[in-house]
Amino acid sequence: MADKIVVIGGGGHAMDVISTIRKNNGYEIIGYTDLFDKGKLLGVNYLGTDDILEDILKEYKNCNAAIGFGNIEISNRRQLIFDKLKKMGFNLPPIISSNAIINEEVFIDEGSIVMDGAIINVYSKIGKCAIINFGAIIGHNSIIGDFVHVSGGAIIAGGVDVGANCVVGIGARIIQGKKIVSDCLLGAGSVTIKDILKPGTYFGVPSRRMNIE
């Protein structure tokens, strides 16, 4: 009998998560939670708001959860939900598409999701509740911090250290060996060629910090 899992969230990313769970992850999706009933998502039933989560744990002992919403800006929302789910007693296994390439000696921490076409190369480490989105590439010996979102098509070269709670935008590039501090947004298509030591929003080629009020 497959282990049970509930998806938290009912938007577009939740549907991507549902589809990824179904790719050889061995879980039975019992439903999704959201503030609003979106109807069935890819055949998955709406269970209610997050207020129902305690009842789910009572019905399904050792239930798993997957966070089904992403972030395209700097936010601690995923961390808050992750911490809440852990405190309640949910397991948050890493969810890895069978269509991703995970090379040798890679560590992927709990709650993280790796989408179709992503490539994670040798000796890289993915922190808690990270998103490695469609077609993203993580080079060898890189560290991706907790709650980081590496967007679709982004390329992170070898030996890069991305701090917690960063967003690497669609198609962004980080060259080898660079360090990115926590709480940074690297905009779509940006190219980072130097260490980033100050939190903030960075755009351009090469990437530069923006003064955004």
Image (cartoon, grey):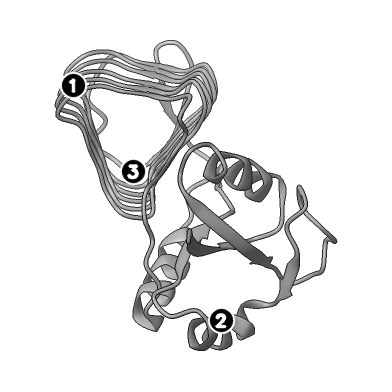
Q: Position of residue 103 (x, y in %)?
A: 25, 21
Using the image, tell me which numbered label, if any, was put on residue 122: 1
Q: Nearer the viewer, mark 3 or mark 1?
A: 1
Residue at numbered disc 2 = 56
Residue 59 image-quadrant placement: bottom right
Q: Position of residue 151 (x, y in %)?
A: 50, 30
**Alpha-carbon span between mark 2 and mark 1:** 38 Å
Mark found first going from the N terminus, 2 or 1: 2
Q: Residue furthest front?
A: 1
Dot 1 amino acid type: Val
Dot 2 amino acid type: Ile
Report the side of 53 relative to 208 (left or right).
right
Residue at numbered disc 3 = 199
Q: Residue at x 53, y 26 (%)?
A: 134
Q: Is residue 49 above or below residue 7?
A: below
Q: Tag 2: Cα neighbours inside 10 Å, few (<14), some, or many (≥20)? A: some
Report the side of 85 relative to 70 (left or right).
left
User: Helix, strand, or loop for circle 1?
Assistant: loop
